[in-house]
Image (tube, helix red, strand yellow):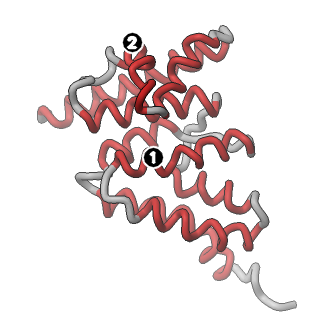
Amino acid sequence: MSVNQDNEIQDCHDIDRFLNLVAGAVARDDRGVLADLRCGFVEQRASKCWPHIANFCDLRNDLERNVWEFVAAGSATVLGTKTTGNMGMTLRKIALGQGGKDGLSSFEPRFRRILGARSAQVVCQLLRGVIRAAKAKSVDINFRTLYWDLIHWNQESRKVRESWATAFWAAEREGESSGIHAVE
């Protein structure tokens, strides 16, 4: 097993352990911890979440720290995580909840801005409002997959972007091929 594979296995355990800690804070209604974690959304207050993420990432590494701050804040905001899908699917659900097909087309420019982001840090900034919209619309997020996608955004950006784009637009294509849009 390579060093890279060992690191990925450790990261996998770390994100799972962290999400379990957040779930525990939610179950205990530990508002202090959840408030600290939500500070990850605001650069000037992000250090409040550091005691909770320091065991999981190198705080000196900007990419790691920014992704962990974002996942910490997001998971403490939405308070529900799912185990399937990616942000493309989540964004589609939010968009469809804002007016069906019309919502999808009006949400598309925002989605394209996210796909066009050059770095994970920019994606995190663009997704803050999406996290809040998911909470408002009771749409759960797969934070485990989101973590991995953000960590790999810079290295394998096309793969992650293509995965999100497929999830966002593919259901429309599948619906057309199955005759859902056929005139009766």
Where does the image place residue 12, in percent across and percent down from the top left?
35, 30
Q: Nearer the viewer, residue 40 or 27?
A: 40
Inter-mark Cα distance, 1 to 2: 22 Å
Amino acid type at mark 2 = Pro
| Residue receiving disc 2 | 51
Place of residue 76 in the rendered image (x, y in percent of width and height, measured from the top left): 58, 26
Can you say which quadrant of the picture contains the N terminus?
Answer: top left
Q: Residue at x 54, y 40 (%)?
A: 142
Instruction: Return the residue nearer the eye: 36 or 82.
Output: 36
Q: Residue at x 59, y 34 (%)?
A: 81
Instruction: Rate crowding at label 2 as few (under 14), some (14 to 19) or many (20 or more) other CA atoms within 10 Å.
Output: few
SS type, badge 1: helix
Q: In the image as oriented, which residue stretches furthest toward the left?
A: 2
Q: Amino acid at mark 1?
A: Gln
Q: Quadrant of residue 84?
A: top right
State whether residue 172 is above or below residue 154: below
Q: Which residue is mark 1?
A: 125
Residue located at (58% from left, 47% from top): 129
Tell me the crowding category of disc 1: few under 14, some 14 to 19, or many 20 or more residues within 10 angstroms, Cα based.
some
Q: Earlier in the sequence, mark 1 or mark 2?
A: 2
Asked if residue 117 lies left or right of residue 132, the reply is: left
Looking at the rendering, in which quadrant would you find the C terminus? bottom right
